[in-house]
Image: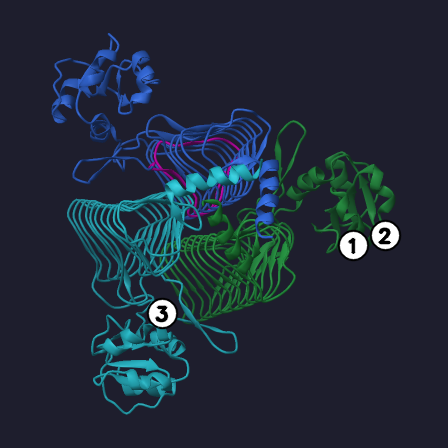
Chain colours: A blue, B cyan, C green
Amino acid sequence: MNLKDLAQALDIKCEYDLEITSLNTLIDSNKNEISFLENKKYINDLEKTNAGAVFVKAEYASKVPKNTIALICEEPYLNLAKASKFFAAKIVEIDGKKPIIGEETIIQENVFIGKNTVIGDSCTIMAGSFIGDNVKIGSNTVIYPNVTIYRDCEIGSDCIIHAGTVIGSDGFGFANTKDGKYIKIYQNGNVIIGDDVEIGANCAIDRAAFKSTIIENGVRIDNLVHIGHNCKLGKGTILTGQVGLSGSTVLKEYVIMGGQSGTAGHLEVAAFTTIAARGGVTKSITTPKMSWAGFPLMEHKTWLKLQGRIAKLLK
Amino acid sequence: MNLKDLAQALDIKCEYDLEITSLNTLIDSNKNEISFLENKKYINDLEKTNAGAVFVKAEYASKVPKNTIALICEEPYLNLAKASKFFAAKIVEIDGKKPIIGEETIIQENVFIGKNTVIGDSCTIMAGSFIGDNVKIGSNTVIYPNVTIYRDCEIGSDCIIHAGTVIGSDGFGFANTKDGKYIKIYQNGNVIIGDDVEIGANCAIDRAAFKSTIIENGVRIDNLVHIGHNCKLGKGTILTGQVGLSGSTVLKEYVIMGGQSGTAGHLEVAAFTTIAARGGVTKSITTPKMSWAGFPLMEHKTWLKLQGRIAKLLK
Amino acid sequence: MNLKDLAQALDIKCEYDLEITSLNTLIDSNKNEISFLENKKYINDLEKTNAGAVFVKAEYASKVPKNTIALICEEPYLNLAKASKFFAAKIVEIDGKKPIIGEETIIQENVFIGKNTVIGDSCTIMAGSFIGDNVKIGSNTVIYPNVTIYRDCEIGSDCIIHAGTVIGSDGFGFANTKDGKYIKIYQNGNVIIGDDVEIGANCAIDRAAFKSTIIENGVRIDNLVHIGHNCKLGKGTILTGQVGLSGSTVLKEYVIMGGQSGTAGHLEVAAFTTIAARGGVTKSITTPKMSWAGFPLMEHKTWLKLQGRIAKLLK
């Protein structure tokens, strides 16, 4: 989409001709992408951005790099939300190629497979599952019944996805207007799942707002787990039942999270970290191989000590 | 159903002829409805009821208003449960009109649409979804794959319901018999969802026991959220991942609930309240625009202070 | 499978001819089953086992009973995992008998029913549901839309299973290799559900690793509940919304668990126990009819007292 047309649609002044292909964060944007600065704590990212254009308030316009076009507006995040709709894919592809199905792959009845989708060899896709448009699935993967895989998602080889699980639903993102409406940020990214991943029943893994929610090789996920948009799960991560990850959580390799534990968003957990059941992670954990518990989170041994001290209160 | 026949079926004495159309609470009943008094804390409601008849213990019979018939019994709630079955709709309608589908609405394959159902214009109903009998859906609404909408539910325009979500499942209600059986209270109400509502993946929203579970305009619900029967979510409410609302929770407009937070039932939360992640609401919140956290719940700033005090215990 | 062939496949020395039919725990194994000892705290079980063979480290070989063959290896649990694959049923049966459907049973469209499956009289199986191979369902049971029942599971009469619920998904079990891979323990058991059981929407109930996950008569389960493999729920148990049970939890009859409560695995809860909302059970509860709360769990009255003491910290 041409930047001039986009700006006009949003009622922002802009006379530059530039082909815009998508939206992205300040850090990751390239010269054909638009980004935004809403929160001034990301001002350093603004100064370093390679974005073609950014939505920005007038007061920060001077910080916009030379090669980036400043789209001056009062509500940058709201404009990003409005812009996101222009880059949203169709909900359902009408045109496109018939899916390609590998050899010895079993597709049961009542399965929907979208346009341009490619499924490898020796897979089993069970009844009632939905494989959206433009999906890629490797070889030897089992999709149990009533699974939903939204468009554009990728799943590796030797994976097992249990019944009822949803992969690629929209992340939870919207901007507020001054009169109390929520404007959807269209989630134009996808989910990419590596090889040898097993995901339990009735989980929900959201697609990224921009780019990808990533689940690396060898991950194990139990039932009823919620993974927000733009999370990244390192190799060998283990999430047990009813874990919830807020958006943009990064778990490095071999992190283990106990039942009903959770994370606040936009944080990183070091490799080989263990979070006990019900643990609530609200800040990044930078030292690997430690065990944590509680909410607020503390070292597991501290939590045990604390329980002793709390028990004393009762005497 | 005639009251005399109903009473006879329940082995309760009653000689009055009265057409009964449904069951309801003491407060909301009209003269063709039956209600009940089990817990004496609702005795004031009994005195004010407009119900045609009430199940009531002998000791409270004198409190039944003049125009209301007292159905004297030892176990009023149990009798209500037994009565509820007589007012339950069929699980599957055999007769009824073919559904009416609006213009430019896309219905993918493997979709079930029930009798008497009306779907508006420009909707997208994706594969594997179930739209029960007597459902109404507005215009421009997207139902992602494998969604289930039970009979009699209503969904507005411009809504998005993500994959695997269930709307209108039975609320969790039953009465105990003395010998340890649970008698189902048939959930004869429905769910009514307003316009511009987005609901994430694999949520469960129960239908009302009587009347409606209500989700007003502009609400945003994340993944794996549980909403019990007879809840009412005000305009612009935001529920993040894995929130759980017990039955008859009322959230006024623009309440925000953080991840994995919850409410006990039969309470009300004032407008513009914020509940932090994991907060557990067990009493009504009457002052609007405040922030709360913890379980038991306390003001968010108190909770932060408390964490400081608890940390001191470790020294 | 012949033991010699199995041992050879695992690169373990064994010259005995013995027909092995399945894997099992030390306590429950019979002479045609294999078991294992990984954790020395089960050494007493090893001494009493009736298993035909056990995977065991060299240091414990002397404790293996006379009639049991010791399969000496360095990583018994890992070998069990590798062995489990040989006893796994096919994901999809190709051969087998057509299902038998009882009289007056309604099967809506888009329902998949597997080979050898038997469904009783007067059931309702709604659209989009998946009933796997070799499943048994009693009479008068309602399966709402988009439910998935995996192969080999059994459901009684007069049950109600709400939409989106998954019964019989694989338990969360795997063994670690030294180089950081997880080897799946194939979940070769099933789920057995008694009569008069109601299960809410979008629950996940895992099949057993060996033998059965058991849900007895009269159980009531709310929405979004997670039940791990090999759990056993006694008669009349009540689980409210978002409860999570780790594997091998045993709840005796009439246990009640409040919303978002949970259990660690391999423990037992005495009859008529009440766990308050958010309660976290980490040890067995042996005295019946008591009320508990908190995490760590304590008597409910103690928990209330503790909240008073904690409140004092703020003064």
User: Which residue lies most toward the front here?
Assistant: C315
Q: Secondary structure at mark 2?
A: loop
Q: CA distance from mark 3 to mark 1?
A: 49 Å
Q: Quadrant of the C terminus of chain C?
A: top left
Residue hosting label 3 = B186
Q: Is residue A129 above or below residue B21?
A: above
Q: Residue C252 versus residue C191: which sits nearer the camera?
A: C252
Q: Would you say B182 lies left or right of B220 here?
A: right
Q: Residue C105 sits in which quadrant?
A: bottom left
Q: Residue B128 versus residue C243: which sits nearer the camera?
A: C243
Q: Would you say B65 lies left or right of B186 here?
A: left
Q: State the predominant SS element of the stretch in magenta.
A: loop
What amino acid type is highlighted by mark number 2?
A: Asn
Residue hosting label 1 = C31
Find the magenta span and give its range: A142-171
Q: Residue A271 sits in which quadrant?
A: top right
In this rendering, the label closer to the viewer, 3 or 1: 3
